[in-house]
Image (tube, helix red, strand yellow):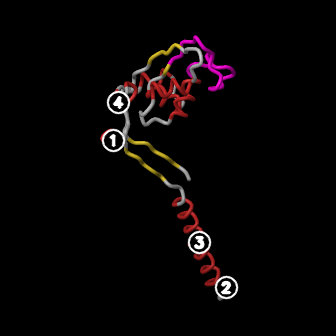
Amino acid sequence: MKNCRPLCLKIFFIFCFVQNIYVYNALASEPIVVLEFSSSQLSGQGLNNSNNFISNPNFSTKHKVKEDETLGHILYSYYGKSGLNLRIVEMAIVEFNPKSFRNRNPNFLFANQSIYLPSLNEMKDLVLGKSKNQNKKQSNGHSTHIYFFGG
């Protein structure tokens, strides 16, 4: 019986050691990425720095849809060469103008509609799920960091 005690302690310590390695590896496998955006990085890449949506994050406007005009045409004329992901902009426009599209399908845009083109801050808040009341409370400026969690 006396010989069993050191063996049990050894097994217990090995178990604790393996469990700590497992927990450490599980935590280490979750990457955390921090990206920093600088507008000086945009110069020389063919991007339009004079775009109103880029120069003023609160800029928004309306557009009257013409016959045979697609959402792609509108996206490119207002947000083209801005460096924005146009698929996300497309989803935001559909979300802000659901009655201008048949069944919220971006391929079925009604002509002669006046659609609202949201600002960068409105799109950001839409993606983050913030309401308009939360936007007014947050008046401390905008962050230059984007955080990604997970793998």
**In this view, the mark in front (1 or 3):** 1
Q: Earlier in the sequence, mark 2 or mark 3?
A: 2
Which mark is drawn over residue 18?
3
Mark 4 surroundings: few (<14), some (14-19) or many (≥20) residues within 10 A: few
Kindly identify the amino acid type of the residue bearing the numbered disc 1: Ser
Q: Could you tell whether 69 is left or right of 146 in the image? A: right
Percent position of residue 8, x then y = 64, 80
Q: Which region is colored magenta?
A: 96-116
Q: Earlier in the sequence, mark 1 or mark 4?
A: 1
Marks 2 and 3, Cα distance to the nearest angstrom?
A: 21 Å
Q: Secondary structure at mark 4?
A: loop
Kindly identify the amino acid type of the residue bearing the numbered disc 4: Gly
Q: Residue furthest top?
A: 112
Q: Earlier in the sequence, mark 1 or mark 3?
A: 3
**In this view, the mark in front (1 or 4):** 1
Marks 1 and 3, Cα distance to the nearest angstrom?
A: 44 Å
Q: How many marks?
A: 4
Q: Secondary structure at mark 2?
A: helix
**In this view, the mark in front (2 or 4):** 4
Q: Quadrant of residue 26?
A: bottom right
Q: Earlier in the sequence, mark 2 or mark 4?
A: 2
Which mark is drawn over residue 4?
2
